[in-house]
Amino acid sequence: MTNYNSVIAQDKDPLTWNISQLKQVLKALKTKDDTAMPAKKTDLYYRYVSWQTRKPRPVENIGQQETAQLEEDVALVPPEDDGNEDEEDGIEAMLLLNGGTGVLAALQDRCFV
C-alpha cells in the first residue's frame, strides 16, 4: 500500500500517471478474482477508472531499506543446535536416577551462572 499512497499523495490527474504508477495503484486495488493486468497505458487507465472506488489492500513492497533490515534480522536468528542435546538429556537422566534433583540443581547453578 506504500506505493499506492505515494502515487495518490501526488494528487495528480490519473491521466498523467505513467504505466508504473498505474500498475502500483492497480496492484493495491486488485482482488484474486480479477483478470490479468493489462499492459497498455490506456487499458490500465480504464481499469483504474472502473476500480477507483475499491478500498486498497495492503501490498508487500520490499525496497532496499526493508531488504537491508531483513538481512540484519538474519543475525538475530538463534544458532542451530550443536547436537549435544541428547547427550545433555542423558546426563540429566543419570543424575536424577543416581543423585536426585539436588545434584542436578547444583550442577546447573555452577554451569549456567
Image (spheres, helix red, strand yellow):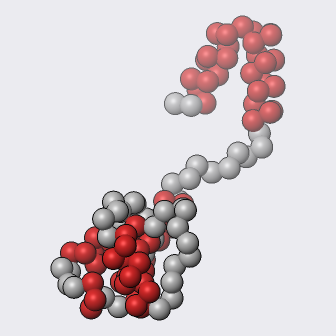
Q: Quadrant of residue 94?
A: top right
Q: Is residue 30 above or below residue 6?
A: above
* 49 horizontally vs 103: left or right: left
Point out the image quarter for the N terminus.
bottom left
How many numbered circles does the render carry? 0
Residue drawn 44% across the image and 72% down it = 27
* 42 horizontally vs 95: left or right: left
* 82 horizontally vs 1: left or right: right
Would residue 18 be visible to someone looking at this image?
Answer: yes
Q: Position of residue 58 (x, y in %)?
A: 40, 60
Q: Position of residue 104 (x, y in %)?
A: 67, 17
Residue drawn 34% across the image and 62% down it = 54
Q: Position of residue 43 (x, y in %)?
A: 44, 86
Q: Nearer the viewer, residue 23 or 113?
A: 23
For this orientation, the residue located farthest to the left is: 11
Q: Quadrant of residue 64?
A: bottom left
Would residue 66 be visible to someone looking at this image?
Answer: no
Residue drawn 80% across the image and 33% down it = 86
Q: Position of residue 97 (x, y in %)?
A: 80, 10
Q: Is residue 33 above or below residue 105?
A: below
Residue drawn 61% across the image and 30% down it = 111
Q: Nearer the viewer, residue 12 or 53?
A: 53
